[in-house]
Image (spheres, rainbow, N blue to C red):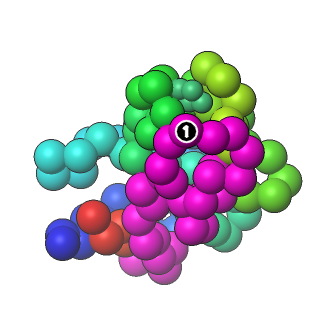
Amino acid sequence: MGKFRLGQSKEDVKGMLPEGNIKVTQLGAKKLCVVRLGEKVYAFEQLCPHRGASLKDGHINRFEEVICPLHSYRFNMNTGQLTSGGGCGDLEVYKTNLTEEGLEILV
Ligand code: FES
């Protein structure tokens, strides 16, 4: 497992991740989606475990779920649990920590 850092400060990270906008970032060998809601940042695998759509084009709802753009399956961004839909596994999620020194992501 590797620890990656994005940005130099919390403000830096907020500038890079406008509220609710899903961004894709490459960390080591993995491409992840990263999204910020307030002081909380979520990181999860880029491709939907159902049929591989890019979750970058998905939506976020007020239940901390990402909704896949292709078949509207929903995944909890904290746990990765599939909350609506069937026939696929959970989403892989990664731990994040937003600090005054920037954003840490454990991959
Ligand atoms: S590809 Fe994501 S729900 Fe089907």
* Location of the C terminus (image quadrant): bottom left
Could you tell me if residue 94 is visible in this image? yes
Q: Amino acid under label 1?
A: Gly
Q: Is residue 48 magenta?
A: no
Q: Position of residue 44 (x, y in %)?
A: 45, 52
Where residue 37 sits, quadrant-wise, is bottom right
* Location of the N terminus (image quadrant): bottom left
Q: Position of residue 35 (x, y in %)?
A: 57, 50
Where residue 46 sits, quadrant-wise, is top left
Which of 23/43 is in front? 43
39 with respect to 11 (left or right): right
Q: Which residue is mark 1?
A: 87
Q: Position of residue 39 (x, y in %)?
A: 66, 69
Identified at 50% across, 42% down, the residue is 88
Q: Position of residue 82 (x, y in %)?
A: 62, 52
Which of 81/46 is in front? 81
Which of 30/92 is in front? 92
The extreme right residue here reads 62
Start-end of magenta stretch: 75-102
Q: Is residue 83 magenta?
A: yes
Q: Helix or strand or loop: what does disc 1 sit on?
A: loop
